[in-house]
Amino acid sequence: MRRGRLRLPRRTLAISAFADLDLDLREAEIATRRVTVHVYALFGNVDVYIPEGIDVEVGGLIVFGRRRDWGRDTARAAEPALRVRAHGLFGTVDV
């Protein structure tokens, strides 16, 4: 599990292979106005936790698995944008 103070660069990569991964971004510092997190799940599950009030766009392709977005649409235009690109095979990605 990765959580706590971390600084997100413009592009971030998270990979889960044959395991589960919890990526907690609720205390992360966003370096730029637009950050892309690429998530790869291979025979595993990835849970991405994002703070409320951040504009989040979730996309990508999961084969023999699923991608779910559990958030509420309450983003503000002045906040930084975060894109989550989920790619997987036999895995689940929850944002």
Image (cartoon, rainbow, N blue to C red):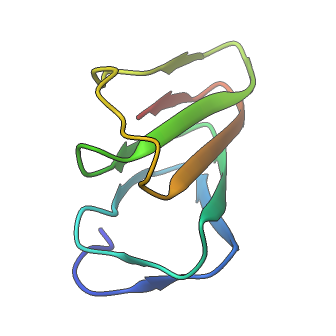
Q: Is residue 8 left or right of residue 12?
A: left
Q: Nearer the viewer, residue 24 or 51?
A: 51
Residue at 41 percent of width and 35 percent of height: 95
Compared to 81, does 76 lie above or below? above
Residue at the far front: name it.
Answer: 78
Q: Position of residue 23 (x, y in %)?
A: 38, 60
Q: Nearer the viewer, residue 19 or 39?
A: 39
Q: Is residue 60 visible?
A: yes
Question: Which quadrant would the N terminus be assigned to in this image?
Answer: bottom left
Q: Position of residue 3 (x, y in %)?
A: 26, 74
Compared to 27, does 6 lie above or below? below
Which quadrant holds residue 6?
Answer: bottom left
Which quadrant holds residue 90?
Answer: top right
Residue at 27 percent of width and 21 percent of height: 72
Residue at 33 percent of width and 63 percent of height: 25
Compared to 54, does 69 lie above or below? above
Residue at 47 percent of width and 51 percent of height: 19
Q: Is residue 1 left or right of residue 64?
A: left
Q: Position of residue 79 (x, y in %)?
A: 42, 55
Q: How many marks overall?
A: 0
Compared to 86, does 27 lie above or below? below
Q: Is residue 33 left or right of residue 55?
A: right
Q: Is residue 46 visible?
A: no
Q: Nearer the viewer, residue 19 or 71?
A: 71
Q: Position of residue 70 (x, y in %)?
A: 31, 21
Which quadrant holds residue 36?
Answer: bottom right
